[in-house]
Image (cartoon, rainbow, N blue to C red):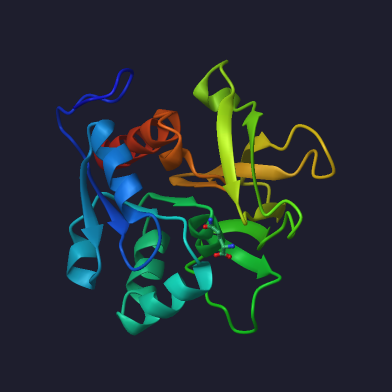
C-alpha cells in the first residue's frame, strides 16, 4: 500500500537496506510505503544493483565488523565516494561520519559526510527519549523523533547542512539531522513512527541522483 503523501511508484528507484544487523525490516517497509523498490543488501553484487542505500539503526560497531567480514566495507566506501545516495539512521549516521568520538579504538566507518559524530551522546540517563523537532526541509509540521542510545553531530564542515537540532534541555542546539549532497543522516529513527517524510526525502534524493 502506498502511504499518503509518498512518492509515486512510477519509475520506482531501487533502494537497498544494509541487512547485517539492526532494524532492517522497518526501513524496508518505510521505503516500500514511499514507492521505492526496497530490498535487503548483504553482498557486494546486491550493492551494485541499487540506486541508493539505507544504513539502519542498530549497533554501529557490530554493523561495521559484519560489513568488513562480508567484504562490504570497501565496496560501501567506494560506492558512497562514487556518489551513491545513502541515508543513515542512528547507527547508520555513525557509519556515514568521517570522524567519530567515544567509539572503541579502531571502530571503522564508511564515511562520506564531513562531520564528527559522538556515539551514545545523550548518556545513560536519557538512554532513550522522544520529542518534537523542527525540521524545515520536511515542512512546517514538526517531526516526532525517537532517540535510542543516539549519537549527535558534534561538528560539521561547511558543506554539511544541519536539518534539525535538539530544541530544549541540556543538549539544546545539538545537530541531529544533516545532509551533504546525496547523503542524509538522522540521529533518530523515523522508521519507527510511521511519519513517511524522512524516507520520502531520501527517495527524492535518490530520484534526483538517478535522473542526473
Ligand atoms: N548506540 C548505537 C551505536 O553506537 C546506535 C543506537 C541505534 O542505532 N539506535 O551504534
Whether residue 45 is visible, yes or no, is: yes
Height in image: 50 above or below 173?
A: below
Tell which residue pokes out farthest to the right in this image: 170
- Identify the image quadrant of residue 145: top right
Q: Position of residue 160 (x, y in %)?
A: 61, 46
Tell which residue pokes out farthest to the top in this image: 140
Q: Position of residue 3 (x, y in %)?
A: 28, 23
Height in image: 172 above or below 87?
A: above
Ligand 1, by image quadrant, is bottom right
Q: Position of residue 24 (x, y in %)?
A: 33, 55
The quarter of the rendered structure image containing the C terminus is top left
Left or right of 31 on screen, residue 118:
right
Whether residue 156 is visible, yes or no, is: no
Tell which residue pokes out farthest to the front in this image: 125
Left or right of 14 on screen, residue 182:
right
The quarter of the rendered structure image containing the N terminus is top left
Q: Residue at x 42, y 55 (%)?
A: 56
Left or right of 136 on screen, residue 56:
left
Height in image: 33 above or below 48?
A: above
Q: Which one is in front, 151 or 184?
A: 151
- Identify the image quadrant of residue 22: bottom left
Q: Which one is in front, 57 or 130?
A: 130
Q: Residue at x 37, y 66 (%)?
A: 21
Q: Residue at x 34, y 46 (%)?
A: 26
Left or right of 49 on screen, residue 95:
right
Q: Residue at x 17, y 69 (%)?
A: 45
Tell which residue pokes out farthest to the left in this image: 10
Q: In this figure, what is the number of numbered marks?
A: 0
Amino acid at each position: 500500500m502506498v502511504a499518503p503523501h509518498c512518492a509515486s511508484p512510477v519509475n520506482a528507484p531501487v533502494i537497498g537496506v544494509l541487512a547485517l544487523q539492526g532494524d532492517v525490516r522497518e526501513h524496508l517497509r518505510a521505503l516500500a510505503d514511499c514507492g521505492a523498490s526496497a530490498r535487503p543488501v548483504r553482498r557486494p553484487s546486491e550493492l551494485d544493483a541499487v540506486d541508493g542505500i539505507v544504513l539502519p539503526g542498530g549497533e554501529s560497531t557490530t554493523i561495521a565488523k559484519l560489513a568488513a567480514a562480508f567484504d562490504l566495507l570497501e565496496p560501501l566506501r567506494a560506492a558512497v565516494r562514487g556518489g551513491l545516495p545513502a541515508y543513515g539512521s542512528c547507527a547508520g549516521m555513525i557509519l556515514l561520519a568521517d570522524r567519530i568520538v567515544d567509539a572503541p579504538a579502531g571502530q571503522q566507518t564508511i564515511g562520506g559526510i564531513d562531520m564528527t559524530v559522538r556515539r551514545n551522546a545523550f548518556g545513560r540517563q536519557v538512554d532513550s527519549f522522544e520529542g518534537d523537532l523542527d525540521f524545515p526541509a520536511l515542512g512546517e509540521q514538526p517531526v516526532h523523533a525517537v532517540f535510542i542510545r543516539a549519537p549527535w553531530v558534534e561538528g560539521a564542515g561547511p558543506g554539511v547542512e544541519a536539518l534539525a537540532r535538539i530544541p530544549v534541555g541540556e543538549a539544546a542546539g545539538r545537530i541531529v539531522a544533516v545532509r551533504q549532497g546525496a547523503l542524509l543522516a538522522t540521529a533518530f529513527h523515523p522508521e519507527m513512527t510511521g511519519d513517511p517524510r524522512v524516507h520520502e526525502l531520501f527517495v527524492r534524493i535518490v530520484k534526483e541522483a538517478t535522473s542526473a
